[in-house]
Image (cartoon, rainbow, N blue to C red):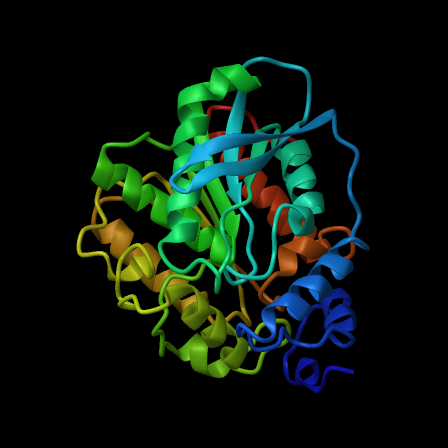
Amino acid sequence: MNPSAQKFELVPELAAIMAVIPPLPVVSPETVAAIRRRVTEASARQPRPDIHAVADRTVPGPAGDIPVRIYRPRDADDLPVLVFAHGGGWSICGIETHEGLCREIANRSGFLVVSVEYRLAPEHVFPAAAEDFYAAACWVAAHAGEIGGDPARVAVAGDSAGANLAAVAGLMARDRGGPRFAFQLLAYPGLDALSERPSAVENADAPMLNRSSSQSMWRAYAGDADLRHPYLSPIYAEDLTGLPPAMIVTAQYDMGRDDARAYAELVTKAGGTVDVLVVEGAVHGFLSYYTQVPASSDALDHACDALRAAVGEPARR
């Protein structure tokens, strides 16, 4: 049993799941291989919804080819495209662990989803993951037509560390004259490596992801970088103008809940648009339980509707 789950008033279906799932361990060079095996084995037991087609390929990156997996929800040549970065603290997950979630997002949103296998820490420290994801997103924006997508409707998304990379991609694109992404969907993003906001303290021992494991992941990825670097902690960017519209989906018991609100306020003050959905009774990573937890499924619907609205598609029900 996970004793920390008893301290938080989770929705009942999520409480039952968290009661038997231990928090993620501290990540280090010595532990990372075993943690990767654990999360890969756990993800293999998750449902993988049927989908029209799945294809693997590579795209060029700053350190060689980057593997991507493309999920096509239906047979069409002009689908909106979502470039997706998986979570896992920049260190422990991959395309396989997020297979089910990407399939579900593609089916619910109608987007062609391109999942990116960026380089992982601690073997590859900052900015390797950010540069890989940005390179893949740029390739997709330039070549969307080749894979059945609409180059005018390319969005970026991710969960947790992957949401950090999606947020950073928006900054990089603006700074480097890159593509204008249609939207950013950020699920419980890592925005501030140094956060001391109330939710970071209140939820320090929350189920799924606690403060010690979270901080170990930030350290593994950051290496010797300044933790306030905007491509590492986007909330410290001096200029937050010119970013794509965004939605942040976060949880009542996520350490980054207040970071999300603070980031949204800063972007809004800079003239941008960020909507924040805080799901009550939920914890970090809750969207992955969309088949078991109605609140997770509802939040995923809400996010997919926001995606569709951003590219001119009607909501699906």
State the residue in front, 142 or 59: 59
Q: Looking at the picture, does residue 298 appear above or below residue 313?
A: below
Extreme residue toward the left, this view:
238
Q: Looking at the picture, does residue 176 appear above or below residue 23?
A: above
Q: In the rendering, at what x and y percent does residue 293 appear?
A: 74, 58
User: Where's the N terminus, which quadrant?
Assistant: bottom right
State the residue in front, 272 or 140: 140
Residue pictured at 76% horizontal, 61% vertical = 42
In the image: residue 275, left or right of residue 237:
right
Residue pictured at 46% horizontal, 27% vertical = 140
Q: Residue 203: tell me if it is visible.
A: no
State the residue in front, 36 or 271: 36
State the residue in front, 277 or 292: 292
Q: Looking at the picture, does residue 25 appear above or below residue 166?
A: below
Residue pictured at 37% horizontal, 45% vertical = 131
In the image: residue 118, left or right of residue 69:
left
Q: In the rendering, at what x and y percent does residue 225 appear?
A: 29, 66
Q: In the rendering, at what x and y percent does residue 129 appear?
A: 43, 51
Q: In the rendering, at what x and y percent does residue 26 appear?
A: 56, 77
Q: How many labels does the image show?
A: 0
Residue pictured at 48% horizontal, 65% vertical = 122
Q: Residue 206: tell me if it is visible.
A: yes
User: Where's the C terminus, which quadrant?
Assistant: top right
Q: Looking at the picture, does residue 246 appear above or below residue 160?
A: above
